[in-house]
Amino acid sequence: AQTVTQSQPEMSVQEAETVTLSCTYDTSESNYYLFWYKQPPSRQMILVIRQEAYKQQNATENRFSVNFQKAAKSFSLKISDSQLGDTAMYFCAFIQGAQKLVFGQGTRLTINP
Amino acid sequence: EAQVTQNPRYLITVTGKKLTVTCSQNMNHEYMSWYRQDPGLGLRQIYYSMNVEVTDKGDVPEGYKVSRKEKRNFPLILESPSPNQTSLYFCASSLVEPSSYNSPLHFGNGTRLTVT
């Protein structure tokens, strides 16, 4: 079964710092997709960044980037120059040929002023 | 505005009283899905639909029903709600199956359900 594990239930950093959220997954397939979703207090689910497994280059979206280590089945999210608006729950998710995203447990990130 | 609309946003009910959570999308998406979010468990899929009249079970379908009679609507039905169905529910849609890279999931704003 496909599983996604986020080992950090909560994290807290100061504004402008860089923070890295961890995610590991389990699959026997070679092609799949990985995602990070942000859920602010408004509850809305917002797609932050996505990565195709066959692409070796790490995805980047402005201050958000990933460190994709395929052999280690690791997909961490780095947020640079963190802002108060980055405070949210972050979910790592995985999809591979099936009709659903499999989500991790989530990491609650707090950015302190 | 392209969006997925869920109603109601909050719902408190009692055990056994049938309820329906509505979901509608205006993007002509083929794929729709329901998830429930629980602390420490992330989001888990309840049911999904690849197209009109085509639905299938996700990981946690027990106690739920869905229908897809029109492309835009995908209601979630709890025939006899129980307290263990207290959760945050999300409807989501995508152009085609979400395994397609160019078909990201669009989520509704969630429905907080409490069953007493």
Image: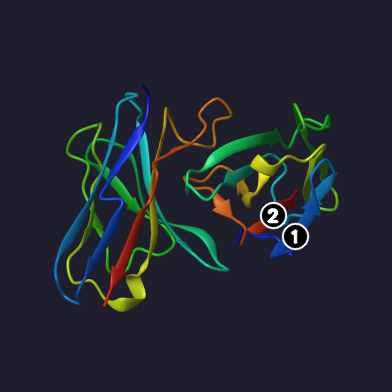
Q: Secondary structure at mark 2?
A: strand
Q: Amino acid at mark 2?
A: Leu
In this view, the residue farthest toward the front is A113
Q: Amino acid at mark 1?
A: Met
Q: Tell me what residue is drawn at x 77 percent, y 32 percent.
A: A63
For the residue pair B18 and B53, the one nearer the viewer reads as: B18
Mark 2 chain: A
Would you call the spot at circle 1 few (<14 residues within 10 Å), some (14-19), or many (20 or more)?
Answer: some
Would you call the spot at circle 2 few (<14 residues within 10 Å), some (14-19), or many (20 or more)?
Answer: many
For the residue pair B63 and B99, the one nearer the viewer reads as: B63
Residue A11: mark in rendering: 1
Mark 1 chain: A
For the residue pair B60 and B114, the one nearer the viewer reads as: B114
Q: A37 left or right of A68?
A: left
Above/below status of B66 relative to A58: below
Q: B93 left or right of A19?
A: left
Above/below status of A26 relative to A64: below
In space, the residues marked 2 and 1 are separated at their CA atoms by 5 Å
Q: CB under 8 Å between callouts 2 and 1?
A: yes
In this view, the residue farthest toward the top is B1
Q: Examine the image and state in which quarter residue B71 appears.
A: top left
The percent coordinates of residue A15 (x first, y second) are: 79, 45
Q: Tell me what residue is drawn at x 83 percent, y 40 percent.
A: A16
For the residue pair A101 and A78, the one nearer the viewer reads as: A78
Above/below status of A34 relative to B82: above
Q: Tell me what residue is drawn at x 70 percent, y 63 percent.
A: A10
**Would you name the residue on which mark 2 appears?**
A109
Which quarter of the image is occupied by the N terminus of chain A?
A: bottom right
Above/below status of A97 relative to A109: above
Residue B50: mark in rendering: none
